[in-house]
Structure formats: structure tokens, C-alpha cells
Image (tube, rainbow, N blue to C red):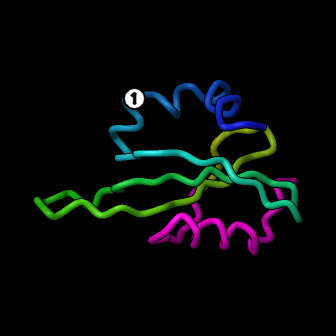
Amino acid sequence: MTLTEFKNNNKQWFSKVNQRFFNDIRYYLLKNKQTNTYFLVRLTYKFSDMLDRPRKYEYVINKITKENTIGELIQKDFETYQQAKEFIKQFHYKND
């Protein structure tokens, strides 16, 4: 599955309105090869710029369901793309 295919199957999630609401900047679709499962990695400001605070980039990860829709958010933030990628390599979630 490619990111373009995934976006086409989840058009509402990837709408400009949603992107602005969540302060998302960029998306990556990664696969854990051991469990054959996909994850959506989002580069985001999250809500860091609220109350006049400076924006802070963070990477967050959503699980992808077996129906290829956006699943739950993993409750861990990452400072770099590489950290998120390493986490996915070691994560043992399988979308049965």
C-alpha cells in the first residue's frame, strides 16, 4: 500500500480542514515488516502553539486498522522521524 492509496481511502481524514485542526504538516506511511502492519506517522505542531507559545515539531503515530483506516493514536511523541521509525520497527502490534 502506498501513502497515495491510503489517502484516497481516507479522504475525510486527509482533508485540509482536518489537517489544520490537528496542525499536521506531513504524513508518512510505514510498515513493520515483522508483523506486516502499517502505521501513519504524522509530523505535526500538535497544539504546541496554543496560548502564544512557540510552535514545536513532533512526530506522532497512528495505528492502521485491517480495514486500512486510521486507528488509535499511540500515546508517545517523538522528536525526530528516525525515532518514530525505530519505534515502529520494535512495536509488536498486529492488526488481527
73 or 19: nearer the eye? 19
Q: Amino acid at mark 1?
A: Lys
Residue 17 placement: quadrant: top left
Up/down of 67 relative to 39, above or below: above
Residue 37 placement: quadrant: bottom right
1 or 18: nearer the eye? 1
Q: Which type of secondary structure does the marked residue at label 1 adopt? A: helix
Q: Residue at x 30, y 57 (%)?
A: 47
Task: Please indicate whether residue 66 sits to the left or right of residue 6 in the image.
Answer: right
Q: Residues within 10 Å of mark 1 (few under 14, many from 20)?
A: few
Up/down of 12 relative to 51, above or below: above
Q: Residue at x 59, y 48 (%)?
A: 28
Up/down of 48 relative to 87, above or below: above
Looking at the rendered image, the quarter that the N terminus falls into is: top right
User: Residue furthest toward the left?
Assistant: 52
Q: How many marks?
A: 1
Task: Please indicate whether residue 49 sits to the left or right of residue 38 in the image.
Answer: left
Q: Horizontal and vertical percent for residue 3? A: 66, 37
Q: Is residue 94 magenta?
A: yes
Q: Horizontal and vertical percent for residue 85? A: 64, 66
Q: Horizontal and vertical percent for residue 43? A: 46, 54
Residue tagged by mark 1? 16
Residue 63 placement: quadrant: bottom right
User: Residue furthest toward the front?
Assistant: 82
Q: Residue at x 24, y 60 (%)?
A: 55
Q: Residue at x 52, y 34 (%)?
A: 13
Residue extent of the magenta highlight = 73-96
Q: Horizontal and vertical percent for residue 61? A: 58, 59
Task: Please indicate whether residue 20 sits to the left or right of residue 95 in the image.
Answer: left
Q: Is residue 92 magenta?
A: yes
